[in-house]
Amino acid sequence: MSIQNNLQMIKQQIEDACQHSGRNADEVSIIAVTKYVSVDTAQEAVSAGVTHLGENRDDGFLHKYEQIDGNVAWHFIGTLQSRKVKSIIDKVDYIHSLDRMSLAKEIQKRAEKKIKCFVQVNVSGEDSKHGINPDQLPDFIRKLSDYDSIEVVGLMTMAPFIEDEERLRSYFREMRRLQMEVQAMKLSHAPCQELSMGMSNDYAIAVEEGATFVRIGTSLVGKEF
Ligand SMILES: *Cc1c(COP(=O)(O)O)cnc(C)c1O
């Protein structure tokens, strides 16, 4: 299967999921996650029409950023160590992994413009997952008003790698509830209009439950390493 075909199939699935849930497919953007593939393959995704690229490590991010041609928005989706902020901050369009105050402080220190951030939420409660606990989320977001370089555009989560669709759905639904809770706070630094959730194995469910960005690696661009 070519990337072009994969993209067509994924778009169709997203359209179907939107139809099931009474949403408009225009509300959903596809981020091609290129961490497992070469620059050439990532470039092929861009040629196929992908306009958002995501990487989860600073070195991979910088390598792709320097090599890829085209008008793309760059997403940093992985755990971000504070000492790596400096190298990526003037190149990213979105950071999906804001999960602690010390990172917010470092972003504030290094940013030369407002940075669109997703607050990462550990909605499944797994110890292995990064992210803010749901019950601490409102307080965390309120405190981010101290950092005027941070705009909380949304919430992000990584669901556990499980088959149980109903459990996955319950996590995504909880994310949507948390998003509405943040929106109801009406904070100017946290419009929280986006939900970054859904990967290769669960994006259709995530879209049915309100995802506006899906992060898709393997089923879109494959896995080369
Ligand atoms: C790797 C990764 C993805 C994409 O995973 P696939 O299962 O290959 O689609 C999405 N989000 C994050 C944070 C990742 O690290």
Image (cartoon, rainbow, N blue to C red):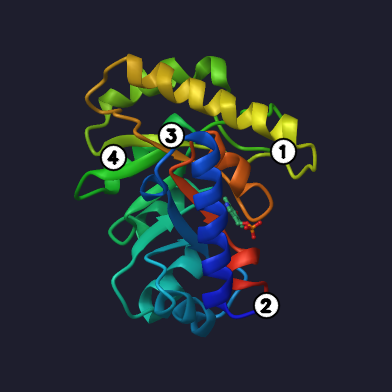
Three-letter amino acid code of the residue under disc 3: Ser
Q: Which of the two labelled residues, at mark 1 and mark 2, occupies the earlier sequence position?
A: 1
Report if the CB atoms under discs 3 and 4 are less than 8 Å apart: no
* Mark 3 or 2, closer to the camera: 2
The residue where tag 4 is placed is 108
Q: Is the residue under label 2 in contact with that under label 3 (CB below 8 Å)?
A: no
Amino acid type at image mark 2: Glu
User: Which mark sits nearer the N-terminus, 4 or 2?
Assistant: 4
Does the numbered disc 1 mark a residue whose Cβ is under 8 Å from ligand 1?
no
Quick check: 146 left or right of 159?
Answer: left
The residue carrying pointer 1 sits among few (fewer than 14), some (14 to 19) or many (20 or more) residues within 10 Å by Cα, namely few
Q: Nearer the viewer, residue 169 or 11?
A: 11
Q: What is the three-letter code of the residue carrying label 4? A: Gln
Whether residue 84 sits left or right of residue 157 in the image: it is: left
Residue 102's label in the rendered image is 3
**Secondary-structure class at tag 2:** loop
Earlier residue among tags 1 and 3: 3
Residue 143 is at least partly visible in this image = yes
What is the C-alpha distance between the residues marked 3 and 2?
34 Å
Tally the marks.
Answer: 4
Residue 184 lies, in percent from the top left, at 34, 15
| Discs 1/3, front | 1
Relative side of 165 to 138, left or right: right
| Rendered location of residue 63, percent (x, y) | 45, 75
- Badge 4 marks a residue whose secondary structure is helix
Dividing the image into four equal quarters, which quarter contains ligand 1?
A: bottom right
Where residue 38 sits, quadrant-wise, is bottom right
Q: Identify the residue at horizontal 78%, vertical 42% (top origin).
A: 162
Q: CA distance from mark 4 to mark 1?
A: 27 Å
